[in-house]
Amino acid sequence: MNAHTPVLIVGAGPVGLALAGDLGWRGVSCTVVEQTDGRIEQPKMDLIGVRTMEFCRRWGIADRVRDAPYPGDYPQDCVFLTGLNGYELGRERFPGRAFEACPPQSPQKRERVPQDMFDPILKRFASSFACVNLQYQTALVSFDNKPDRVEATLRDVQTGETRTLTADYLIGTDGGSSLVRERAGIAMQGNQALTYTTNVLFRCRDFPSLHRMGKAYRFIFIGEEGTWLTIVAIDGGERFRMSIVGTPDKVTHSEDDIHAALRRAMGKDFDYEILSVMRWVRRELVAERYGAGRLFIAGDAAHLMSPTGALGMNTGIQDAVDLGWKLEAALGGWGGAHLLESYERERQPVAFRNVRASTENLGRMLSTRDRRPPPQVFEDGPAADAIRAEYGGWFTEAMRHEWFMNGFHLGYRYDDSPIVWPDGTPAPPLETSTYTQTARPGARAPHVALKDGRSTLDLFGRGFTLLRLGAEAPRAEALVRAAADARVPLQVVDLVEAEVRKAYQRALVLVRPDGHVAFRADTEPREPRAVIDTVRGARAAQGRAHLEAAS
Ligand SMILES: Cc1cc2nc3c(=O)[nH]c(=O)nc-3n(C[C@H](O)[C@H](O)[C@H](O)COP(=O)(O)OP(=O)(O)OC[C@H]3O[C@@H](n4cnc5c(N)ncnc54)[C@H](O)[C@@H]3O)c2cc1C
C-alpha cells in the first residue's frame, strides 16, 4: 500500500465519491477511505438535481442515472391528505421521471434516483480510474495537519490495525458528525435542532392497492395537529420511507409509536415489513470555515440542512466540483497561492442561502401547525368538500416553493469570488423558483443547444475554455499566450451561432473548468496576464473597483 497520496478523501458518501470521480476524470491520483463496507442501510437522498445531472453528463454517467431502476412511469405527485383512506386536500401533479421535460435552461432534468442506486453509479465511475484508490472498512482516526503535508492515521475496521498515510491535501467528506471538521476545530453556526425526526424504511408489496390516493411520490399527512407525517415511494416499487416529522423537542419514537403511525396513516391495519429505522436531527448549520491549512471539508461535513428542497447532497456535489479543478491546479503547479482559499469564498455563501431556503420550506410544510385545519376537513359532505378545497388550495400553493427551486439548483453564483474578473455590470437578483441564465462573471455558463446537437455545456470541463463568439470576435491572442505562459490549460472555441452570442452577451467569454464564467468582454483585455493570474488564484484578493477599472 502506498505511504503517500496527493489527495486523501475521508468518507465515500455521494460527495466523497463525486470528488474522487471528478479527480479521477482529471487524472489526479487520490485515495478514498470509508469506514463502512459501503452498504446503504437506509437511502437518504433520492432527488438528483438538474445541476448535479449536468455534472453527471460531463462525467459521461448521465445515462446510467437515467437508466437506474426507479421506474420511469411512477407518478411523482405530491399529495396532501388527512390519511391514505381519508381525504385528499390537494395535489401537485408531476409525471413519472421518464416523462418530465428538461427545463429550457439545461440539456438535463432532475432525476428521482435514491442513494442506494446513485452511490453505486458514483462508485463505479470513481473506480473506473486507475488513479483512484477506494478503501472500504478503513477509518480515519486522527491526523496531523503539517505545513507541507497531512499525516493521517487510518485503522482497518476489521483487524484493528493502524497505519500512516501522508497526503498533500486531506478532504473531509465524512458527513454531519465529521471527525475532520471537529479535529480541525471548525465550529458550525446556525440552528442545532429544527426537528427530532424518525425515518422508517418499510416494505409493502401492495401499498397502492390498499388505499384510494393512487400512486404518488410523496404523501404529506395533515391531522388535527397539522403536518405530522410524510411517506415517500423510495424506489417506485415495494419500499417506502415514512418520516415522523417531530418537533424541536427531543423525542425518541418507540416501536409502538412507529406501528401506530403506520396504522394511522393507512387508517387500518395492513401488512408491512420494517427494514430499518433511522432517528435523526434536522439541522440548519454551516461551518464557520471550509478549510484549515491543507485540509478542506465538503458536503454534510460543511453544511447540514433540512431535506425539504433536496438541496443537501446537491449542494455537496457542487462543493466537490468547485474543489476538484482547484486541487488539480494546485497539484499541477498552475494554481496560484490563493486558488484554494477561493473554495470557501465561493461555496460558503451558497450553503448559507441553501440551508435557509431549506428551513423556509420546512416552515411552509409545518405551517399547518399554526394555521390548523378546520374540523370540517375531516368530515363528509359537500360543505366539508368546499372547506377542504379552500384549505388544501392554500397549502398546495404554499408548498410550490419546494417543488420549483431552479433558482437554487442552477442559479447559484460566485458574484464576490476573488477569482472572477468582474465586468462592471450589476448583479441580477438571485431567483428562487425561476432561473434566468446569465453569463455574468461568477455565474454558471448558460446552456444553449448547438446546431450539431451538443450543448454549450459539453464544451466545458477539463481546463479553461475561451469562447470567441461571432465572426468579429477579438482573437484574444495575448490572453491565450498569458494562459500558456502560466501553464493554465485553455482551449479556444470559435462559435458563430447567434443564439450563443445572445445568451453570453459578449464576444469573449472565459469559462472555468467547473463551468462558471471567469471573465467576459467585447474587446481585447487590457491586462491579459492580470486576468489569467486572477482566475488561477495567483493574485491576493483585490478591491473589486481595481479589477473593474482594469477591465
Ligand atoms: C431523509 C433525507 C432525505 C434527503 N433527501 C435528499 C435529496 O433528495 N437530495 C439531496 O440532495 N439531499 C438529500 N438529503 C441530504 C443528503 O442525504 C446528504 O446531504 C448527503 O448524503 C451528504 O453526503 P455526504 O457524502 O456529504 O455525507 P454522508 O452521506 O453522510 O457520507 C459520509 C461518509 O463518511 C463516512 N465516514 C464518516 N467518518 C469517517 C471516518 N472517520 N473515516 C472514514 N469514513 C468516515 C461515513 O461512513 C459515510 O459513508 C436527504 C437527507 C435526509 C436525511
Image (cartoon, rainbow, N blue to C red):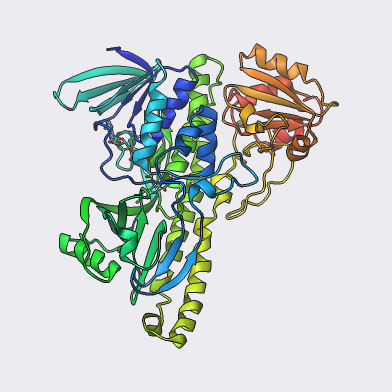
Residue 201: x percent and y percent?
27, 52
Q: Does residue 489 appear anywhere in the picture? A: yes
State how many labels appear. 0
In which quadrant will I find the N terminus?
Answer: top left
Residue lying farthest to the left in this orientation: 159
Picture quadrant where residue 313 is located: top left
Picture quadrant where residue 465 is located: top right
Asked if residue 64 is positioned above or below residue 112 in the image, the reply reads above
Q: Nearer the viewer, residue 76 or 489?
A: 76
Q: Is 62 situated left or right of 528 in this image?
A: left
Residue at 32% in and 17% down: 166
Residue 408: x percent and y percent?
55, 49
Q: Nearer the viewer, residue 536 or 321?
A: 321
Q: Nearer the viewer, residue 13 or 71?
A: 71
Q: Is 503 situated left or right of 533 in this image?
A: right
Q: Is 120 situated left or right of 60 in this image?
A: left
Residue 80: x percent and y percent?
42, 67
Picture quadrant where residue 471 is located: top right
Q: Does residue 294 appear anywhere in the picture? A: no
Residue at 61% in and 47% down: 103
Residue 18: x percent and y percent?
43, 31
Q: Nearer the viewer, residue 338 or 22?
A: 22
Residue at 38% in and 22% down: 127
In which quadrant will I find the C terminus?
Answer: top right
Residue at 30% in and 63% down: 246
> Quarter of the picture for ligand 1?
top left
